[in-house]
Amino acid sequence: MKEAEIRQVLSNNIKHYRGLRKWSQVVLAQKLDISTNFLADIETCKCWVSSSTLSKLATIFEVEAYELFKPERTPNNETKEAIKSIVNDISVTIEHSLRQITIKYLN
């Protein structure tokens, strides 16, 4: 993995964990004791984190530091469409089954 890719993974994970907690950049920057502008630069891959800031990030997010460098495993569009199709099929099947139960036992 190239340096730019590593920076992007870290950036994405910081935004991900910050978003899970519904924290603004201001809130996270305060927790890290860094400026909001510096955090914004980290999240846009313009700046790199120090080992101290990396350690604080891991502690604040309650993860191991290496987890901040794990690429997100997001499904591609084909997988998303397959999941949507399966969910739709299950919904239709459940709806049909409920109708059949209603007809058989409640009418």
Image (cartoon, rainbow, N blue to C red):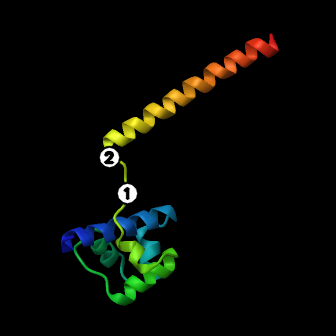
Q: Residue furthest bottom?
A: 52
Q: Position of residue 59 (x, y in %)?
A: 50, 81
Number of numbered tags placed on the structure image: 2
Q: Which residue lies furthest to the right in this view?
A: 106
Q: Is residue 48 above or below residue 10?
A: below
Q: Position of residue 51 (x, y in %)?
A: 35, 88
User: Which quarter of the rendered picture does the C terminus lie within?
Assistant: top right
| Closer to the camera in the image, 68 or 94 | 94
- Residue 33: tell me if it is visible: no
Residue drawn at the location 36% of the way across and 81% of the way down: 35
User: Which quarter of the rendered picture does the N terminus lie within?
Assistant: bottom left
User: Which disc number belongs to residue 9?
Assistant: none
Q: Where is residue 12 in the image (x, y as percent from the top left)?
A: 34, 64
Question: Are the residues tagged 1 and 2 within 8 Å (C-beta)?
Answer: no
Q: In this view, does 67 lie above or below 80?
A: below
Q: Where is residue 34 in the image (x, y as percent from the top left)?
A: 38, 83
Q: How crowded is mark 1: few (under 14 residues within 10 Å), some or many (20 or more)?
A: few
The disc labelled 1 sits on which kind of residue? Arg
The answer to whether 21 appears left or right of 40 in the picture is: right
CA gap between label 1 and label 2 equals: 9 Å
User: Which disc number belongs to residue 73?
Assistant: 1
- Label 2, on which residue? 76
The disc labelled 2 sits on which kind of residue? Asn
- Residue 23: tell me if it is visible: yes
Residue drawn at the location 52% of the way across and 65% of the way down: 21
Q: Is mark 2 on a helix, strand or loop?
A: loop
Q: What element carries label 1?
A: loop
Quadrant assignment, res 41: bottom left
| Closer to the camera in the image, 92 or 20 | 92
Q: How crowded is mark 2: few (under 14 residues within 10 Å), some or many (20 or more)?
A: few
Residue drawn at the location 47% of the way across and 73% of the way down: 27
Q: Residue furthest top?
A: 107
